[in-house]
Image: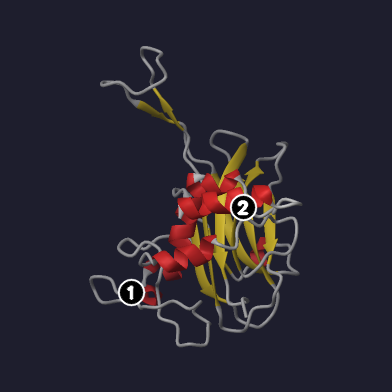
Amino acid sequence: MQEYGDTQIRTALKEKPPVSHWGLDARQHEVMKVVLMNSADKLKDKGDGLLLGMTRTLLDLGEKTWKDSDAYRDRTLPLDSQMGTGHLHAFRAYEQFSPGQWSSDAPVPAIAWDYNSVGAKRSDAPRYRDYVLEKPLPAGSFVSATLTWDRAVALEDANGNEQYDMGEGFIDGGLNNLDIYLMRAEDSDTKKNIWSSVSEVDSVEHIFHPVPTAGQYKIRVVYRDRANEQVQPYALAWWTAGAK
């Protein structure tokens, strides 16, 4: 995946004008994390694309599917304790990665990713970003969206050599709290959301939820609570049924 990204970056640099959807952000570890997680298989698609072309149905140790899991029903639990976000599927991860980076500045394609930032009040970054899908989604189709960012961790560098040595520890700098919402494109109030992922303790948020009616939708990334830095970088990947 990283070799593919590097190839795309080199190709983009040769284009005139340069291709805007491939740059060094493709090398960010948060990007690779959301690409792998968001493209994972959960429930086998019936051939109509409503389940995003997934190839297998995953079962936990109790032979329950994702729809039976706490993560599917509870907005504060982005990950299932056994299944995570599903079963790794390398080719789907490539499909998730290959459209490149798309920012929230304009309508986005059905499948893509972004590396960006949001900020607390009075910071240089916006408090939230809206990713409006350029194509309408069919009723009953699922939206998969995964958001990840880093915890703040600092090395207790006793000898000042700026690297870990035996006996040194780490300081927990806390976790800025980010949330994601699935919303109708025309709505601005998050209380009107279709679904959300709002964990207060995880550095990952994940949505896998159907839309109730056909129409235009968006994914909103929100800086909820500050624990350390005012501006928080993040990676977001999304996969919808609007690809046809």
**Mark 2: few/some/many CA within 10 Å (<14, 14-19, 20+):** few
Residues under numbered marks 2 and 1 in contact, where contact means CB atoms less than 8 Å apart: no
- Expressed as whole percent of the image width and height from the top left, the position of residue 238 reads 56, 64
Three-letter code for the amino acid on which mark 2 is drawn? Thr
* Residue located at (72% from left, 69% from top): 185
Residue 58: mark in rendering: 1
- Expressed as whole percent of the image width and height from the top left, the position of residue 175 reads 49, 40
In this view, 122 is above or below 57 = above
Note whether residue 40 is visible: yes
Three-letter code for the amino acid on which mark 1 is drawn? Leu
Given residues 217 and 47, the one toward you in this image is 47
Residue bearing the label numbered 2 = 11
User: 129 left or right of 91?
Assistant: right
In this view, 63 is above or below 34 = below
In this view, 156 is above or below 52 = above
* Residue located at (36% from left, 76% from top): 68
Quarter occupied by the N terminus: bottom left
Quadrant hosting residue 228:
top right
- Expressed as whole percent of the image width and height from the top left, the position of residue 207 reads 51, 65
